[in-house]
Amino acid sequence: MGLSAVAIAYIMFRPVSHNAILYSVFFGLGSLALLAIWVRRPAVSRELLAIAVVLGLLGVYGTLIGPGNPGLVFTVLVYFAAPVLYLLCAVATTQRMLFWFFRAASVSTIAIGVLILLFVGGEAERIPQLVPEWLEEATGLGATFGGGSSQARFYGLSSLAALGPMWAASLLVRQDDLLPRWGVRAVCALLAAGAAFVSSREAIVLVIVAAPLLGLIVNAVLRPRPVSTPVRLSPKLIVAFLATCSVASVLAITLAPRIAAFGPVVRALDSVRAFLTGPTGSGSVDQSIRSEQAWKLIQAWQQNPVFGAGFGARVPDYSRTSERPWVLELQYHLFLFNVGLVGVLFVGVLACLAAILLKRAAASAPALLPSLTVTSVAGLSMLIANATNPYLQAPGHVWALFLPLALANLMTLTGRDTTAVAGLPPRNVE
């Protein structure tokens, strides 16, 4: 259990680069999961089993329609090998493992946030440079300044696309048997937001800002409905509701223009606009590249819209790098080009199965609904950020999609007795 927590913390802290170490950690994590499955022989929910089957069929389909594609091996690692690894971890997960997962995630978030803020502050000469050079080289730290803003680099920065929203959403839910104390979650959320801001990572800033609202929506959708209980509204409750709505409306009207004019939010919205509308002839260099890429991928997809060109296919007459021409930023456009509308059908089935699993989990173990809500927000936020940045191209980020599935699978199997599995510590134990 301790080794698994250390492995997860390392993957979050360094999800890319140093592949010899990273893939060794993946192998170790998979081996631990297999050993746990062999020893404990855990049950698996029918929805998670169906998700595994559909993912396997998708991997086989994308491989069979493009066996000669130059990037097939690389793409299969993303769409098949990584899901298999995390599915094994999901099956092997216990409540105690998830308890320590959240602690490992908080340590990784604090370490990433503190290092980035200290380094950028030192480079900007606001504080002495406290980060030693050997740590800069080991973690990929770097920073550039211009136009009154800063841009930082760090191997673990992309993990904040899931960790930041997870902690931000957790501020609005009660503490359950898995989540850390509210103060720890608040520190993690603030450090993640600060690191994303000084690094000018617009997509991460956007999902962190949207996370509380997204968490409220997810919680409302997943929350089990009471059994035909009549609702009686007292006058005091009505007055309190109207007062809350009035204050919220005033704050929204006052703050909305400022939020809309906030630099990172503006750039994030521009990226989304470029993602959806294609080339516009204006905007930053990155937006122009994404716009051109979207247009090229849509044109290539139209050559075989139903079945696609197969995993690892190269877009005709277009590439971002000569070494790996099949690697592009726009993952969803690329997925559509690879597996066509048939692949979209697979994704639709996976989304339905995941929704059914999450909903049944919330009904089976409502005491863990707060943790299920925040992990679901982490997964959704990673999917949203991935629209303009290829985060899910790296197996080190795929954990965000399988974390809520692992928790949901456990909740459906443990039922309402949420403290009986694996000797989970009492709620007040940190």
Image (cartoon, rainbow, N blue to C red):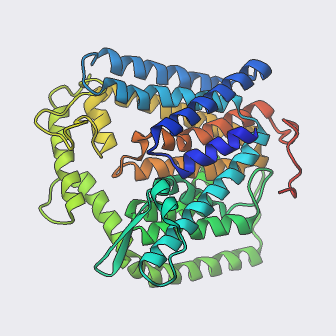
Image location (x, y in percent) of residue 313: 24, 27
Image location (x, y in percent) of residue 225: 71, 47
Q: Residue at x 75, y 58 (%)?
A: 180
Residue 284's quadrant in the figure? bottom left
Residue 122 lies, with reference to residue 302, above or below; the image says below
* Number of marks in the rendered image: 0
- Is residue 224 something one can see in this rendering? no
Compared across the picture, whether 240 is left or right of 417 comes to left
Q: Residue at x 25, y 22 (%)?
A: 69
Q: Quadrant of the N terminus?
A: top right
- 332 and 24: which is toward the camera: 24
Residue 172's quadrant in the figure? bottom right
Residue 237 lies, with reference to residue 174, above or below; the image says below
Image location (x, y in percent) of residue 356: 59, 34
- Is residue 328 something one can see in this rendering? yes
Image location (x, y in percent) of residue 53: 52, 19
Q: Residue at x 45, y 45 (%)?
A: 16
Q: Residue at x 43, y 64 (%)?
A: 206
Residue 77's quadrant in the figure? top left
Compared across the picture, whether 110 is left or right of 390 comes to right
Q: Quadrant of the C terminus?
A: bottom right
Residue 234 lies, with reference to residue 36, above or below; the image says below
Compared across the picture, whether 344 is left or right of 282 comes to right
Compared across the picture, whether 199 is left or right of 359 comes to left
